[in-house]
Image: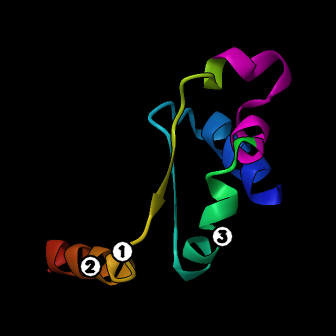
Amino acid sequence: RSMATFAGNACLAFGARGGAVIAGRVAVQLEPYLLHPSFQQRFHRRGLMTLYLADTPVRLLKDEQASLRGAAAHFFATV
C-alpha cells in the first residue's frame, strides 16, 4: 500500500500523467500485488486530484538489466 501511495503522490508532484514505472528486483517479486485492483485504487485515489490521475497507468518493468543499460547510456552520452 505504501508503494501505491508513494507512486500516486510522485505522479502528482511531478505531473507525470504518462504514468509510473515500477522497476527493480523487489518490484518483480511484488508483481501479484501490483496487479491487484486494490493497488490501482490506492494509486488513483487522491481526493480532489482523483480525476487528474484517473487515466494514469502504472507499469511494471521486469528487465533486470534496465538500470545498467540506463547508466551506460548516460555515461556514453556524456563522454
Mark 3 burial class by Cα count in 10 Å: few <14, some 14-19, many 20+: few
Dot 2 corresponds to which residue? 69
Of the two numbered discs 1 and 2 on the same chain, state the one appearing first in sequence.
1
Q: Amino acid at mark 3?
A: Leu
Q: Pointers 1 and 2 in contact (CB under 8 A)?
A: yes
What stretch of residues is rendered in magenta?
38-51
Mark 1 burial class by Cα count in 10 Å: few <14, some 14-19, many 20+: few
Dot 1 corresponds to which residue? 63
Q: Amino acid at mark 1?
A: Asp
The span from disc 1 to disc 3 (Cα, nearest Å) is 14 Å
Name the residue rendered at 79%, 48% in the picture. Answer: 5
Is 67 contained in the magenta span?
Answer: no
Which of label 1 and label 3 is nearer to you?
Answer: 3
Q: Position of residue 35 (x, y in %)?
A: 61, 52
The span from disc 1 to disc 2 (Cα, nearest Å) is 10 Å
Badge 3 element: loop
As drawn, is 2 to the left or to the right of 73? right
Mark 2 burial class by Cα count in 10 Å: few <14, some 14-19, many 20+: few
Q: Position of residue 63 (x, y in %)?
A: 36, 74
Name the residue rendered at 33%, 83% in the picture. Answer: 65
As drawn, is 54 to the left or to the right of 37? left
Dot 3 corresponds to which residue? 30
